[in-house]
Amino acid sequence: MSDKLNQFSYNESVSDSINRAFQFQKDIVNFKEKEKELNKIIESFISDYPKDKILELKLKEYVIGFGAKNPSFCYRIENELKEYGNFHGSTSYKFGLYYGKTASDQTVKYRTSKNKFGNNVEDALIKIKKEIVSLLNAGEIGNDEKIKECKLAPTYRGKILATYFSNRYLAIFSDDHLNYFLEQIGENPDFANDPLDKQKKLIEWKNSQQHLKDFSLYLFMRYLYFVYGRPSKNNGNQSKANILTDEQEKEEIAKSDCWKDTVQPNYDETRKKKSEPVIINGQKQYERDIKEAKKALKRANYSCEICSEHPTFIRKKDGLPYTEPHHLIPMSFSSEFSENLDREQNIVSLCSNCHNQIHYGEGAKEMILKLFDERKAILEIIGIKISKTKLLRMYGLK
Ligand SMILES: [Zn+2]
Ligand SMILES: [Zn+2]
């Protein structure tokens, strides 16, 4: 029965995308018009920032954070070229260096992506400019290995390549989007592959299609979004699916009131087998019990487990400080364990900012490792064993 249902919705979405493909062809004049406008913006950007001038950029000419009155390299690549590939869900840390504040520190100042470029602002600037130049050198001759060695954030790396070499690199660089489109065209995205390899697979496919092979890469990008839409709730990858169920859990907790029944001096150390998954949109989903999450928040004294000093606010429902539950070993990997992952021991209490950062931000690795060190032993007591590398891989990290 459920197979039949899946078959039906699959056929329905295929015929829908065929209709959209025809519609795209009909509207192609408009898309080409947009392409012309974009090409002008790209041309003026490149003529202002030719490769041989990058190393001369001064701090303020590079950083974002002073607003529109300071149209810097980062400001312009993010804002003028907004329509050309998105920088979805990332902070200004992707630029390696920016001017501004963070949620936990409201001082406005220059900030570097410390683990990549060090603390010193001037040094970081030099390193970043060198990275950009060697990226452009590699991009020019199609040296994939060199491109993959680039230390800039993958989305930023992709944006630079697509801007300077719009005939060679696709302006789609978020892993979510690349995986989604590969799935749509019937390719199996290998989640471990570099985004560059995924782009190449998409371009290969384009060139093999009679109706697409003459499209520029810009038109092809527009075509993909027009025909298949964006990855969303129903068709995102694993980490997306996981945060969405996180969302539901947050809501359930916000609505529920009684916290009294969650008082327990010690962890419940009985073993619990995982529940049978339900298949929703082709993905296995495991049931969650919000009592487990509430116990975890209470045990953390409703503070952020990355740093208890992180600011939070008061829940309007019951006057308790607001933090969010996060499953350290993501629920979406339940199939790899015999034990239930929805246990208090596997749930951490995070402030809203840290919760988003651990899913989408740079610096997530350090957070995961810190939490793991604190939880490893108590997880093992209830039969949940995992290595650091494997855990990091679940978050798409090395
Ligand atoms: Zn989460
Ligand atoms: Zn926090």
Image (cartoon, rainbow, N blue to C red):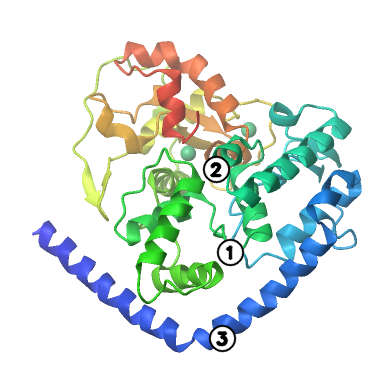
- Say which mark, if any, is on residue 144: 2
Q: Is residue 212 left or right of residue 70?
A: left
Identity of the amino acid at label 2?
Answer: Asp
Q: Does label 3 or label 1 sit earlier along the sequence?
A: 3
Q: Nearer the viewer, residue 226 or 293?
A: 226
Q: Is disc 1 placed on a helix, strand or loop?
A: loop
Q: Quadrant of residue 178?
A: bottom left
Q: Quadrant of residue 386?
A: top left
Q: Residue furthest front?
A: 141
In the image, what residue occupies the spot 29% across and 58% down?
186
Whether residue 159 is visible: yes
Q: Is mark 2 within 8 Å of ligand 1?
A: no
**Residue wearing tag 1:** 167
Which quadrant does ligand 2 occupy? top right
Identity of the amino acid at label 3?
Answer: Asn
Residue 153 pos. (x, y %): 63, 41
Q: Does label 1 or label 2 sit earlier along the sequence?
A: 2
**Residue wearing tag 3:** 30
**Separation of residues labelled 1 and 2 (CA atoms):** 16 Å
In the image, what residue occupies the spot 69% across and 48% down?
136
**Separation of residues labelled 2 and 3 (CA atoms):** 34 Å
Q: Is residue 39 above or below residue 349?
A: below
Identity of the amino acid at label 1?
Answer: Asn
In the image, what residue occupies the spot 44% across and 50% down?
198
Query: Nearer the viewer's eye, disc 3 or disc 1?
Result: 1
